[in-house]
Protein backbone atom coordinates (compact mmCIF):
# COMPACT_ATOMS: atom_id res chain seq x y z
CA UNK A 1 0.00 0.00 0.00
CA UNK A 2 1.10 3.54 -0.71
CA UNK A 3 0.21 6.97 0.60
CA UNK A 4 -0.06 9.61 -2.10
CA UNK A 5 0.21 13.18 -0.80
CA UNK A 6 -0.44 15.99 -3.25
CA UNK A 7 0.04 19.69 -2.59
CA UNK A 8 -2.03 21.56 -5.17
CA UNK A 9 -3.50 24.98 -5.89
CA UNK A 10 -6.85 25.47 -4.09
CA UNK A 11 -8.87 26.21 -7.24
CA UNK A 12 -7.82 22.84 -8.70
CA UNK A 13 -9.37 20.77 -5.87
CA UNK A 14 -12.73 20.06 -7.54
CA UNK A 15 -11.09 19.13 -10.83
CA UNK A 16 -8.65 16.73 -9.14
CA UNK A 17 -11.39 15.23 -6.96
CA UNK A 18 -13.62 14.57 -9.99
CA UNK A 19 -10.72 13.02 -11.93
CA UNK A 20 -9.91 10.71 -9.02
CA UNK A 21 -13.59 9.79 -8.68
CA UNK A 22 -13.65 8.81 -12.37
CA UNK A 23 -10.85 6.26 -11.83
CA UNK A 24 -12.62 4.78 -8.79
CA UNK A 25 -10.81 6.42 -5.87
CA UNK A 26 -13.21 6.75 -2.95
CA UNK A 27 -11.30 7.88 0.13
CA UNK A 28 -9.53 11.24 0.17
CA UNK A 29 -8.45 13.43 3.08
CA UNK A 30 -8.15 17.14 2.28
CA UNK A 31 -6.48 19.84 4.39
CA UNK A 32 -6.00 23.55 3.85
CA UNK A 33 -2.29 24.26 4.30
CA UNK A 34 0.14 27.11 3.69
CA UNK A 35 3.67 26.94 2.42
CA UNK A 36 6.13 27.90 -0.26
CA UNK A 37 8.58 26.27 -2.59
CA UNK A 38 10.93 27.82 -5.05
CA UNK A 39 8.67 30.83 -5.56
CA UNK A 40 9.26 31.89 -1.91
CA UNK A 41 6.04 33.89 -1.68
CA UNK A 42 5.24 37.16 -3.38
CA UNK A 43 4.65 40.85 -2.70
CA UNK A 44 1.14 42.33 -2.57
CA UNK A 45 -0.25 45.85 -2.26
CA UNK A 46 -2.98 46.49 0.34
CA UNK A 47 -4.35 49.99 1.01
CA UNK A 48 -1.23 51.55 -0.40
CA UNK A 49 1.15 49.49 1.72
CA UNK A 50 3.35 46.80 0.23
CA UNK A 51 3.80 43.58 2.17
CA UNK A 52 5.28 40.14 1.57
CA UNK A 53 3.11 37.03 1.55
CA UNK A 54 5.56 34.34 2.71
CA UNK A 55 3.18 31.41 2.88
CA UNK A 56 0.88 30.70 -0.03
CA UNK A 57 -2.46 28.91 0.55
CA UNK A 58 -2.46 25.36 -0.83
CA UNK A 59 -4.53 22.19 -0.57
CA UNK A 60 -3.00 18.95 0.73
CA UNK A 61 -4.68 15.75 -0.43
CA UNK A 62 -3.87 12.40 1.17
CA UNK A 63 -4.93 9.13 -0.46
CA UNK A 64 -4.02 5.57 0.58
CA UNK A 65 -4.13 3.13 -2.34
CA UNK A 66 -2.99 -0.37 -3.22
CA UNK A 67 0.35 -0.69 -5.02
CA UNK A 68 -1.26 -1.64 -8.34
CA UNK A 69 -3.12 1.69 -8.80
CA UNK A 70 -0.58 4.15 -7.38
CA UNK A 71 0.88 5.16 -10.76
CA UNK A 72 -2.59 5.78 -12.18
CA UNK A 73 -3.48 7.95 -9.16
CA UNK A 74 -0.26 9.97 -9.48
CA UNK A 75 -0.77 10.47 -13.24
CA UNK A 76 -4.40 11.51 -12.70
CA UNK A 77 -3.49 14.09 -10.05
CA UNK A 78 -0.62 15.42 -12.16
CA UNK A 79 -2.83 15.90 -15.23
CA UNK A 80 -5.79 17.42 -13.35
CA UNK A 81 -3.74 19.80 -11.17
CA UNK A 82 -1.36 21.10 -13.82
CA UNK A 83 -1.64 24.72 -14.95
CA UNK A 84 1.87 24.99 -16.36
CA UNK A 85 2.72 27.90 -14.08
CA UNK A 86 4.97 28.12 -11.04
CA UNK A 87 3.43 26.81 -7.82
CA UNK A 88 1.43 23.93 -9.33
CA UNK A 89 2.56 21.77 -6.41
CA UNK A 90 4.17 18.44 -5.65
CA UNK A 91 3.16 14.80 -5.29
CA UNK A 92 4.82 12.53 -2.70
CA UNK A 93 4.47 8.74 -2.59
CA UNK A 94 5.41 6.82 0.56
CA UNK A 95 4.97 3.26 1.75
CA UNK A 96 2.20 2.48 4.24
CA UNK A 97 2.95 -0.37 6.63
CA UNK A 98 -0.52 -0.96 8.06
CA UNK A 99 -4.09 0.28 7.79
CA UNK A 100 -6.78 -0.55 10.36
CA UNK A 101 -10.47 0.24 9.91
CA UNK A 102 -11.51 1.21 13.43
CA UNK A 103 -15.19 0.26 13.08
CA UNK A 104 -14.64 -3.34 11.91
CA UNK A 105 -11.05 -4.11 12.82
CA UNK A 106 -10.22 -4.94 9.19
CA UNK A 107 -6.52 -4.65 8.39
CA UNK A 108 -4.37 -4.10 5.34
CA UNK A 109 -5.94 -3.61 1.92
CA UNK A 110 -9.29 -4.89 3.27
CA UNK A 111 -9.42 -1.71 5.38
CA UNK A 112 -9.13 0.55 2.36
Image: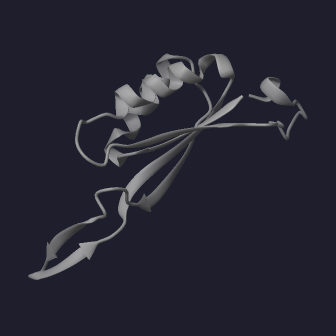
Q: Residue furthest left?
A: 48
Q: Residue 99: horizontal and vertical position, in percent?
A: 80, 36
| Quadrant placement of the N terminus | top right
| Quadrant placement of the C terminus | top right
Quick check: 43 left or right of 5?
A: left
Question: 24 or 56: which is nearer to us?
Answer: 56
Question: 72 or 111: which is nearer to us?
Answer: 72
Quick check: 82 left or right of 110?
A: left
Question: 95 or 61: which is nearer to us?
Answer: 95
Q: Residue furthest right?
A: 105
In this rendering, is residue 45 above or below 56? below
Question: 56 or 32: which is nearer to us?
Answer: 56
In this rendering, is residue 109 above or below 32? above
Q: Residue 90: horizontal and vertical position, in percent?
A: 43, 43
Q: Residue shown at 65%/16% (left/top)?
A: 68
Q: Residue 103: horizontal and vertical position, in percent?
A: 86, 38
The number of discs equals 0
Quick check: 74 left or right of 55?
A: right
Q: Residue shown at 56%/18% (left/top)?
A: 24
Q: Residue shown at 43%/61% (left/top)?
A: 34
Q: Quadrant of residue 97?
A: top right
Q: Quadrant of residue 75?
A: top left
Q: Residue furthest bottom?
A: 49
Amino acid sequence: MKKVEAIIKPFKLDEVKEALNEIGIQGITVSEVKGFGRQKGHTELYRGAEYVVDFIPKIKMEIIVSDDVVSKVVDTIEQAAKTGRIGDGKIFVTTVEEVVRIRTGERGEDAL
